Amino acid sequence: MANRDPRSRLEQLAQARRLSLGDFLKEFPRQAEAAGEDGVFHVSERQAKRWLAGGAPLPRAVSCRVLEHWFDEPVEQLLGPPKFEIATTAVTEEDIIVNAARESASHSIESSSAIDPSALEHLAAMAAQAAVDYYKTSSIEMLNNLVALRNSVYEQLDRTHKPRQQAELYLIAGQVCGLLSSVSWDLGHADMAEEQARAAHTYGSVIDHLSLSAWARALQVTVAFWDGRPRRAVTIAQAALETAPAGTARARLHSVKARSLALLGARQEVQAELAKAADELDRAGDDPFLDEIGGELGFDRSRQALCAGAAFVALGDGDQAEVEALRALDLFGELPEAIRWAAGESGARIDLGTARVLRGDLDGAEHALRPVLELDPPRRTEAVTLRMQHLGRMLGTARYRGAIEAINLGNEIEDFTAHSLARTTVRAITDGR
């Protein structure tokens, strides 16, 4: 019991006293005697496990009296959820992300009384809304909401043994873990983002859901190339493309593979992958998971253009990078604000600024970057910050040494990255709420 998160108040108190399940079974008769109960009372291992898991019906009266005497709390409270108090010290987003990722990874490799179908509908609707909210909600707020939603899904998984319901819940769990991967990366935690993406892929494998699996692999690719592992990113993408469904899933994989190849300087391969992504988008639109839910699960031409612009930036091709970045901005601008990816649009603006720096147009670069430089810190995701840092390094090269425009813009970028989202903290939240 000491090596798992408590599921009930009883298990929480037992862990605090370092009681194993065997210790609990041995101690129960002694506590019965101390409580003044006549006779010798025992509890079966099966019954004890039900109590510790939480949510069990009230036991017989004598057992209630023993438990209340032993732990000095009402039995209804003991069989209910654990208690968590808000810490008096600040909890950082790293604490939340690390804990959430480890819990996701642990639960994703386990195989799990039916639940009300309306509960499944409610959870599916919440997960779908979260995918859309990702585009316009701050990463910190998304983190809080997604951890709570994921824990609710896990609670329902523990309550049902119907294969069909389990499959639906695994799909929702995979979707939420994938969104947690995106949010973890936005907050600057590559390792935890990759762990969440692996958890999402595991759920997809358990239920043979190819679209979920492909999306999860694309998330892993994205984390890998941003984390400086482009070869690993290419390997993951290539393997995922072998089973990914046509359309949106393959378009995303080809696009992130192109970005990975660009970091390796493979220009011809980059162009081939971008062309394949465009072809797949011609076939996109009917995936019941990626397209119908949309939001962060979707992948449209604006995102494909964003990937193309970033790829040509990595190749050092300022002319083509500017073309693709402008195309991305035009496509983002055509979308309603409610479904427009704000961080992606900022990324396109930075790519445009970088393309102009590559071409020696510092005034044009400053103009492109101005809306991004004015972003509030909670909107400065890790990808936005890394793009800015890359541009800042370019401005510090010998080519621009002594140029007042480069110095001023470099100073603004330095201040921008010093107050990025990855350096902010979040309010304390209780685990499992």
Image: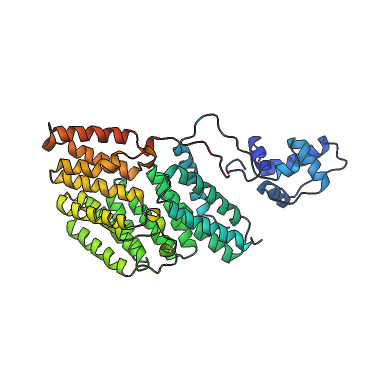
Q: Can residue 149 be seen here?
A: yes
> Which of the 4 image quarters holds residue 209?
bottom left
Q: Nearer the viewer, residue 236 or 213?
A: 213
- Residue 296 is left or right of residue 406, and the answer is right
Residue 277 location in percent, x, y? 28, 63
Residue 384 location in percent, x, y? 31, 44
71, above or below 238, in the image: above
Q: Can residue 199 be seen here?
A: no
Q: Residue at x 38, y 60 (%)?
A: 298
Residue 36 location in percent, x, y? 85, 36
- Residue 313 is left or right of residue 88, and the answer is left
Q: Residue at x 81, y 39 (%)?
A: 32
Residue 359 location in percent, x, y? 13, 46
209, above or below 98, in the image: below
> Which of the 4 image quarters holds residue 271?
bottom left
Q: Residue at x 71, y 52 (%)?
A: 46
Q: Quadrant of the N terminus?
A: top right
